[in-house]
Image: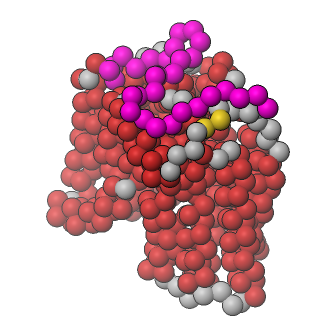
Amino acid sequence: MHFTARVLSWTGSAVSPIALAFAVLHIGGGAGALGLVLAASVAPQILLLLVGGVVADRLPRARVMVWSNVVCAVAEGLAAALLWSGAARVWHLVLMSGICGVAAAFFTPAAGGIVKEVVPAEARHAANALLKIAQNLVKVGGPALGGVLVAAFGSAWAIGWDAATFAASALLFARIDLKPGPVKVKTGFLADLRDGWTDFRSRRWLWVMVVQGALVVPVWLVGYQLLGPVYGARFLGGAGMWGLVVSGFTGGLVAGAAVALVWRPRLVGRVVCAGTGSLALPLAAMAAAAPLPVLVAATAAAGAGLAVSMTVWSGLVQERIPADRLSRALSYSTLGQLVPVPFGYLLAGPVSRAVGVRATLAGGALVIVLAAVVPLLIRQVRALAMAAGHPSQEPVPEGTAAVSVRAPR
């Protein structure tokens, strides 16, 4: 049930970007208008992720996921209706995008925590790998499906399809029947927020790796998503050749998730750092003006490394952090990696103009390598490992406010 709902939701989300882009163009907007629509989705997540983490730890996570999907289904359904009627304006799409961004701020922490509730501990690694395989397969086929829908039926139908997948996912999430969990002693919202922060910063291994992500994520997105197409246009001959590079990355994501399905490494910290370091390969290949086959291979290796590292990291976090704190920990983790991204996009243009695209890519590769290696100097990160026997949880840090007891139904 959970797996099917997530796949449906990802299918809609993969179609949405191309549908939104052509919807904005269809109603007379340009690049600036599209930027507003996209920014409206990101800003609420930055502002509300921590709130979403607290809510997901206080309420049943499946219920939070249901209502998040319902909100997005209604918002996108109304946007599709406005597009069909010809009454849509850019501000309508900005509002719709913002509403879905708010819903995502609540959905993301709940979705990250619910796997621990719906999957037995011994099957959790395989479940994380299967989810990653499905997500990456959708990334391969989703944009193509979006292009077909927009070309054949128009952007309104494509956005309507996204709304329908949100509604169907909500129905499936509503059917998830969980056993009763811990009964939490109710504290104030701000106390829960402080408690989550205290818990997050007490786990040195966690915040160190989040700092790593805060450095790597914006550098990777700038190098691959922003400067990559520029490099493809200048040095590879255009979009067609860059499309091969993108295909190498998505193929690597699928292959890496498949490897993670059958390989369960014990020394997770080292594997995660190695996977993170692999993201430097495509940037270094572009900086060195490597031949296209080498660049495609480097990008495929980066995709595979990223998929393996994300899968084993998910399992480690689910194993080590108690269920009643997991969503808050994930919200702090996600926020820490999300906040630097807009600054990276803003700096990319001036830096690349000042020193050149290839020099900027070389600098990005160096930053990623350093961010991957430095945490390994910390013994606690080097020793990060999955439990050999029954999964364990770290003790709740002293001074935290949440208290729970096991209660019968």
Query: Foreground residue, 127 or 144?
Result: 127
Q: Is residue 405 magenta?
A: yes
Residue 167 shows in the view: yes
> For the N terminus, which image quadrant?
top right
Query: Foreground residue, 281 or 172?
Result: 172
* 392 up-or-down from 368: above or below: above
* Name of the residue lying farthest toward the left: 354
> For the C terminus, which image quadrant?
top right
Task: Give the image location of residue 55, x and y in percent.
Answer: 58, 51
Q: Is residue 61 magenta?
A: no
Q: Residue at x 55, y 84 (%)?
A: 91
Task: Give the image location of residue 175, x and y in percent.
Answer: 83, 45
Q: Residue at x 36, y 16 (%)?
A: 383
Asked where in the image residue 152 lies, by quadrant, the reply is bottom right
Query: Foreground residue, 214 or 159?
Result: 214
Task: Give the image location of residue 177, x and y in percent.
Answer: 80, 38
Q: Residue at x 44, y 80 (%)?
A: 32
Q: Residue at x 57, y 36 (%)?
A: 324
Asked where in the image residue 238 lies, by quadrant, the reply is bottom left
17 vs 224, left or right, is right
* 378 up-or-down from 64: above or below: above
Task: Give the image location of residue 276, x and y in percent.
Answer: 38, 35
Q: Which residues are magenta?
A: 380-409
